Amino acid sequence: MLRTFLLLLGLPIALSAAGCVEMGTYEKTASQLDEARRAGAQKDQQIRVLQWQLAVLDQQFRAAAQHNEAVQQGVSAEMQKLAAANVELTERLNKAERDRAALEAAASTLPPAGKDAKGVHYGDMRPEEMRRLLLTLDARNAQMVEELARIERLLGKRDPPLREPPARASNNDVIDPWGFGSRK
């Protein structure tokens, strides 16, 4: 009986302790749930901030891509211009080399230093004398070019030649083509 009594007495004590444990677990769970809600709200706010930053970065990336494309087009156009200039310069270089080769070939056919066909002695001329002679020749050539231009201007001012002969006054007299002098 004593045992039963102790058992009956211990039952309410055990139930009250179990109730306290359940109440402590509920409060603990509720506080963890509130903490999880706050952490979730913070994570949602961080996600929105990161999405906004991603949108800004995407916009900047697109702008940079457009700028890069424009720069590439400009560089491509510049490269085409430079390629065309390179071709032109290569052609000019080749022409200059051909002219130089032609001049060297022509120089090899010149008589040796001494007098030329007109009796002018060029072989012993100093560079200053040769430059003076070249300047004189250049001046004479310039005068000839000016004279030719003047003549062309004068010819350009001239009335063009008539294509049809001017109309003559006609008379009704018929002249004998055999020269007998009779008129009809």
Image: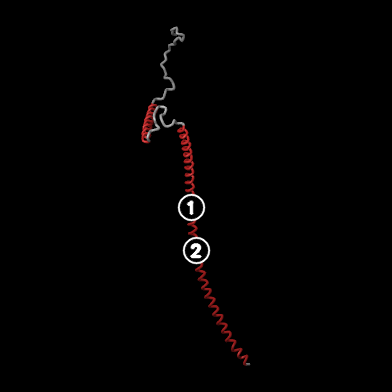
Looking at marks 1 and 2 on the same chain, the residue that comes earlier in the sequence is marked by 2
| Residue that lies at the very extreme toward the bottom in this rendered image | 1
- Whole-percent x and y of residue 123? 40, 32
Q: Which residue is pictured at 49% across the width and 56% down the height?
A: 61
Q: What is the secondary structure assignment of the residue under circle 2? A: helix
Q: 125 or 71, which lies in front?
A: 125
Asked if disc 1 and disc 2 are in contact, CB closer than 8 Å, the reply is no
- At label 2, the amino acid type is Leu
Q: Is residue 89 above or below residue 23?
A: above
Q: 128 or 42, which lies in front?
A: 128
Please give the label number shown on residue 14: none
Residue 134 appears left or right of 64: left
The residue to which callout 2 is attached is: 50
Q: What is the secondary structure assignment of the residue under circle 1? A: helix
Q: Which label sits in the foreground, 1 or 2?
A: 1
Q: 131 or 74, which lies in front?
A: 131
- Whole-percent x and y of residue 33? 53, 73
> Alpha-carbon neighbours of circle 1 within 10 Å: few (<14), some, or many (≥20)?
few
Q: 163 or 75, which lies in front?
A: 75
* Quarter of the rendering occupied by the N terminus: bottom right
* Quarter of the rendering occupied by the C terminus: top left
- At label 1, the amino acid type is Asn
User: Coloring scheme of the render?
Assistant: secondary structure
> Alpha-carbon neighbours of circle 2 within 10 Å: few (<14), some, or many (≥20)?
few
Residue 20 appears left or right of 117: right
- Whole-percent x and y of residue 99? 46, 35
- Whole-percent x and y of residue 163? 44, 22
CA gap, disc 1 and disc 2: 26 Å
The residue to which callout 1 is attached is: 68
Q: Which residue is pictured at 50% across the width and 60% down the height?
A: 54
Q: Which residue is pictured at 37% across the width and 35% down the height?
A: 126
| Residue that lies at the very extreme toward the right in this rendered image | 1
